[in-house]
Amino acid sequence: MKAAIIGYSGSGKSTLAAKLRDIYNCPVLYLIKKSVITSR
């Protein structure tokens, strides 16, 4: 099973991922997107 959980900071993404892990007995992979802004 694959699922992507997207949301704002503090919206409960990790909590939801942990609950889905427990219910479906599947691994969880956390991907953190970091934006880099450069000035010219």
Image (spheres, grey):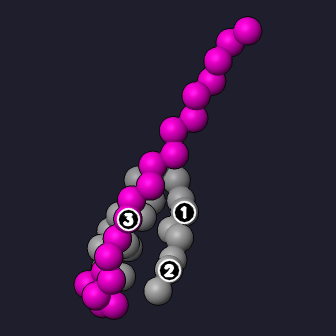
Q: Would you call the spot at circle 2 few (<14 residues within 10 Å), some (14-19), or many (20 or more)?
A: few
Q: Which mark is residue 29?
A: 3
Q: Residue at x 73, y 9 (%)?
A: 40
The reply to whether residue 12 is in sight is no
Image depth: mark 3 or mark 1 in front: 3
Q: Amino acid at mark 3?
A: Leu
The reply to whether residue 22 is in sight is yes
Which sits earlier in the primary sequence, circle 2 or circle 3? 2
Q: Residue at x 32, y 76 (%)?
A: 27
Q: Residue at x 47, y 86 (%)?
A: 1
Q: Amino acid at mark 1?
A: Ile
For the image, the number of numbered tags is: 3
| Residue 22: in magenta span | yes
- Which residue position holds label 2? 2
Q: Which residues are magenta?
A: 21-40
- Secondary structure of the residue carrying numbered label 1: loop
- Which residue position holds label 1? 6
Q: CA distance from mark 3 to mark 1?
A: 13 Å
Q: CA distance from mark 2 to mark 1?
A: 13 Å
Q: Amino acid at mark 2?
A: Lys
Q: Provide residue 9's location: percent of width, then percent of height.
A: 46, 50
Instruction: Say whether marks 3 and 1 touch (CB < 8 Å).
Output: no
